[in-house]
Amino acid sequence: MKLNAIERAAMNNPIRAAHQHHREAAWFHRLAGGNLAGQNVLEVGCGRGVGAEVLLDRLHANHVTAFDLDDTMVELARQRLHQRPVSLSVGDICDIQQPAASHDTAVDFGIIHHVPHWQQAIAEIARVLRPDGLLLFEEVPRHILDTWTFRKFTVHPRENRFEPNEFTAELSRHGLHGTARIEHHLGGLIFIGAARKS
C-alpha cells in the first residue's frame, strides 16, 4: 500500500533522514557484523532514496538496487541519488523483478508491514538472496498498528499483520534464520533484526 499524506510527511523529513543515517545505520552495521563493502544490496521500498544513501555512505555497499511501489518516490530518489551506484525502478515487493540468488544483502527499512500479503514479500526476498545472504529488517508490530493513533492517521492493511515472533517464524519458513535476538526500539514502536539464508 502507498503511504498517505501524513505518513509521507513522517517518513520524508530531515529528522527521519538523520535517524536513518545515524541510529538505524548503526543498528544495521552491528546486526550485519560490520559494513556491506563489496556487496550488491537490495533495498525494498526505497522511498525518496535516503535508505539507499545510508547503505552507500554509512554501510559502504558497492551497489544498491532499489524499488518502490510509488513512482513519485522513485523519481525523488533518482534526483537524490543522481550519478551514484544505484539502480532504481518502480516495483512490487511481492513480485521482485530480479533474478534468483542475485543479491548479497536485502534491507527493509519498515516496508513489509505495509504489504497486504507480507508472506509473499518474504518469499520473494528469500528468492533473490544468494545462499548465506543477509536480510536486515526494521518493522512495526501488529499491536502498534492496532493503536488508535495508527488507525486514525495512517493507512495500513488491517488483517494479516504480525508480531515479531510471527514475522521471524515466516522468515524461517523460507530458509531465513535469525542471527541474533530481536531488538525493540523507540519504546516498542519498531523491532529490528537480521536473518541469514541457509
Image (cartoon, rainbow, N blue to C red):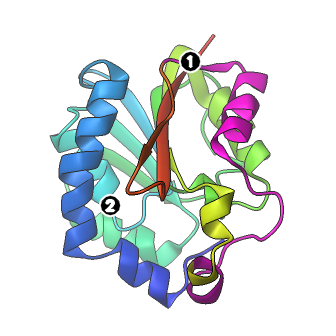
Q: Is residue 156 magenta?
A: yes
Q: Residue at x 20, y 52 (%)?
A: 21
Pointer 1 residue: 130
Is there any visible trace of residue 103 in the rendered image? Answer: no
Callout 1: helix, strand or loop? strand
**Residue furthest right in the image:** 159
Callout 2: helix, strand or loop? loop
Binning the other alpha carbons within 10 Å of mark 1 as few (below 14), some (14 to 19) or many (20 upward) gives some
**Residue furthest front in the image:** 187
The label on residue 49 is 2
Q: Residue at x 60, y 58 (%)?
A: 91
Q: Nearer the viewer, residue 96 or 23?
A: 23
Instruction: In the rendered view, tell whether residue 158 sits above or below residue 172.
Output: below
Q: Nearer the viewer, residue 68 or 79?
A: 68
Q: Residue at x 63, y 82 (%)?
A: 148
- In percent of width and height, residue 146 lies at 69, 70
Q: Are marks 1 and 2 in contact (CB under 8 Å)?
A: no
Q: Amino acid at mark 1?
A: Arg
Is there any visible trace of residue 185 in the rendered image? Answer: yes
What stretch of residues is rendered in magenta?
150-179
Left or right, 23 with respect to 176, comes to left
Q: CA distance from mark 1 to mark 2?
A: 24 Å
Q: Is residue 192 magenta?
A: no
Instruction: In the rendered view, tell whether residue 102 sits above or below residue 106.
Output: above
- In percent of width and height, residue 114 lies at 64, 64
Image quadrant in which the N terminus is located: bottom right
Q: Amino acid at mark 2?
A: Gly
